[in-house]
Image: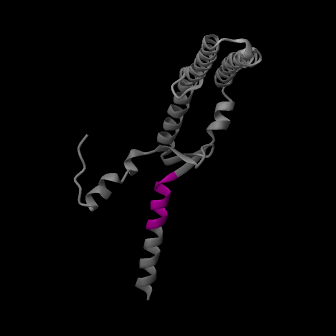
Amino acid sequence: MKSKSIFLAAIAIMIALNTQAQRYAFIDTDYILEQIPAYQEAQTEIDAQAEKWQKQIEARYAEIEKMYTAYKAEQVLLTPEMKKNREDEIINKEKEAKDFQKEKFGVDGALFKLRQELIKPIQESVFEAVQKMADQKSYAVIFDKAASSSALIYANPKYDQSEEVLQRLGFTPESE
């Protein structure tokens, strides 16, 4: 009976030591970025540029609407050739407006590139600070509570067990 309680105490101590070895933390990148003046300036610049482009797009669509309204009003007086020319002109203007909108707000558009240029260096400096903190304080994992699903922002590679899982599945990990 006595040896059983000693054994259980030893296991409890080992579990306690093991859980202390792996430390976890979380950060709030939204809060951190809001406290950095360079980020605020960059965000203001991005917002101003986006608003400017949006106004240009709205002006283009307003012009197209005027063209279409004028065409509808004059349609009965136009020859078939003139109708076709006007319709083509309206269609081309609409295509130009859509292309401009895609160029500015599309997946790889100017807004995305501007954000990469202004925000990415700030985000990288935050990530470097997180890595240094994690190394100094021996954190195994750091989560970002600002992310939609508490994203993992840092993981100490010494705790990565991916190769062992592959080996247990019967695969030999490729060497890097």
Q: Position of residue 81 (x, y in %)?
A: 60, 11
The residue drawn where x is 26% and y is 58% is: 167
Say whether residue 157 is left or right of residue 90: left
Q: Which residues are magenta?
A: 14-23
The residue drawn where x is 68% and y is 24% is: 40
Q: Position of residue 134 (x, y in %)?
A: 50, 41
Name the foreground residue: 14 vs 120. 120
**Residue 108 versus residue 87 in the image, above or below:** below
Task: Tell me if residue 114 can be seen.
Answer: no
The main secondary structure of the magenta stretch is: helix
Q: Position of residue 163 (x, y in %)?
A: 30, 52
Q: Please tell me in which quadrant of the rendered image residue 95 appears.
A: top right
The residue drawn where x is 51% and y is 29% is: 124
Name the foreground residue: 1 vs 70. 70
Q: Residue furthest right?
A: 73
Q: Position of residue 37 (x, y in %)?
A: 68, 23
**Residue 70 versus residue 148 in the image, above or below:** above
**Residue 139 versus residue 88 in the image, above or below:** below
Q: Please tell me in which quadrant of the rendered image residue 41 appears.
A: top right
Give the quadrant of the N terminus.
Answer: bottom left
